[in-house]
Amino acid sequence: MIVVSGDGLVGRDADVEGVEEAFRRTRLVTLTGPPGAGKTALARVIAARHGARVVDADQGPSALAEIGLLAGDGFLVVDGCDRVLELLVPYIGVMLQRHPGLAILATCRQSLALPGERVVALRELAAGHREELLGRLGVVAPPETLRRVDGLPLTLVLLAAALRRGESGGPLLDLLWDLGHDGPPRHATMRTAIGWSHEQCTPEERLVWARASVFEGGFDLEAAQAVCGDDDVTSAVAALVDRSLVTRSESRGRVRFHLPETVRAFGSEWLSRAGEREATEHRHFHHFRTLARRAEAEWQGGQLRWYRRMRLERGNLIKALDSRLSDPEGADDAQDLAGTLWFLWACCGLQKEGAAQLARVREAGGSPGPEQDKALWTAAWLHAALGDPDAAEEALYCCANQGPARLTQVSAWVAAQRGAFPEALRLIRDAREGHRRDADLFPGFLPSYTVIATTLIRMGDLAGATTVLREGRELCVTTGEIWTRSHLDHLLAQAEHLMGAASAALTSARGALTTARQFGDPAAQAAGVELVGVLTRDGALVAAADLAWAGMEGLRSPVLAEIRDRAPAIPPAAGLGLDDAVALALEESPDESPDAKREVW
């Protein structure tokens, strides 16, 4: 039992209400969920509320006789239907037909598939509830340990036992046991709890489960087919979902699947036993490199679509890099993937992470050539964005081919950062000629407007900067490019503010901030919040920006810093979280904010 105090369960209020609501519409409700989700505990709490009898289906055929004796006009809980499912399902159906006043709450790892049944699926506990449960169990888990485990209540109960034993390292499933556990014997170890479900799977389902363990952060059906399938895996994935071993979620029309961490660890053990790890990780890498190449090729015309998809795959992309970097012969593959992901690192708020990954790739020592130069160019771009011109220049110097216009453009940015403004303008003119010759609209020609405009603003040529920015913005609108347009809008707001056009500056700043939020870019959002805060003299926004910048050294532009320093004193106020500050800066109510409507997985 995972009831840890007299007042009930942790983090299951919504699930209890879901069961009660379901019984207002039907007489059969089934609680489903992965092994260790707390189905038995929740069912017994509900039984106690209603004064219901509980039948333990683990008793086998004798449970049928007990159901027959207890069936009547009332409420009955049938716990643990999995082990006698084929016998139990038709019998429950008959009992419900014979007794119109009977209501049954069943617990099972899958639906009973009976007419009128409603299913309430238990998911992992949210982060705050995980800490609360561990606290009630009298332990505090180190953050690195919490990151290793999932939010299944049984996982946390067994983790608490491990922490009391002084254990926190080693393979995950070796950690999760407690022979003194007061629940069913199968719950004394997480490996045993999951193992029973493994026994019920077909060989094909077991193979897909094992191979799916290589995914980090979930996967979609396309990835499952590419990585897990010799044949069509759709039915196997659907069966694993039905068995509550894989969870399914949907957001913005995209369906994703996820294995709880303990279920994933179990599959990973079987993948190693089958001798398939190397081959499966190769398939995983090749799938996500192909996906990265598609995203790169289609980025110009589908920036937000690819941003949403690739941010979801962030864990898998890092896993793909890790798998090649751990292979002595994988350095070339790693630098190819890392360089291909320039759009993710530079445009989606992952500048620091991208720079760190590219540093790992350089240490691995890939072969010289176009892929290495691309990775170095990407690293130089990121270092420039992070305000480190020395590191940017060093990466540029290491490129074997010094001719590409994209390298010249980063050199112009570096020159501007060092205050060599005439040199920056000369270099950016050369870069733009190359972009025209190469028909490189993005990331070439369009972002060059930001380099020119920033340089002109810092030189004090506000009229010239405004002209450049409006020209660049018009071209972005014509071509449908929104990432660069957001940055141009932010620079335009700065120039308009410095020219005394306060109303126009506020409109431009809010337009830039709206797009920055769509790309999930914390630095661009912090810049937008700070600028709106200065323009509106809002102390809460300025304080929120200060809090956000504390973790993003180097990303704040000198022009923005100067604007803030020259602004009249703003009354101090308590800072907000960045999401709330963005909503306030855009004059949204809490219900209007996209974060208030975002699906939580």
Image: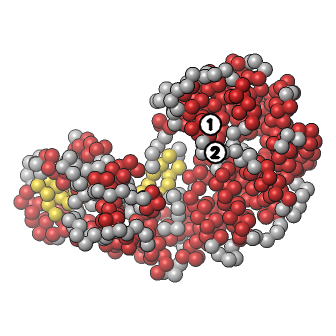
Q: Residue at x 45, y 75 (%)?
A: 269
Marks 1,2: beta carbons within 8 A: yes
Q: Position of residue 543 (x, y in %)?
A: 57, 31
Q: Mark 1 = which residue? A: 526
Please state if 185 lies on the left or on the right of 372 as rendered.
left
Q: Position of residue 35 (x, y in %)?
A: 32, 63
Q: Position of residue 360 (x, y in %)?
A: 68, 64
| Secondary structure beneath label 1 | helix
Q: Is residue 262 visible?
A: yes
| Secondary structure beneath label 2 | loop
The type of residue carrying mark 2 is Met
Q: Is residue 112 visible?
A: no
Crowd band around label 2 with a 10 angstrom C-alpha radius: few (<14), some (14–19), many (20+): some
The type of residue carrying mark 1 is Ala
* Colour scheme employed for the rendering of this structure: secondary structure
Q: Residue at x 71, y 70 (%)?
A: 364
Q: Would you place residue 311 above or below residue 58 in this image?
A: above
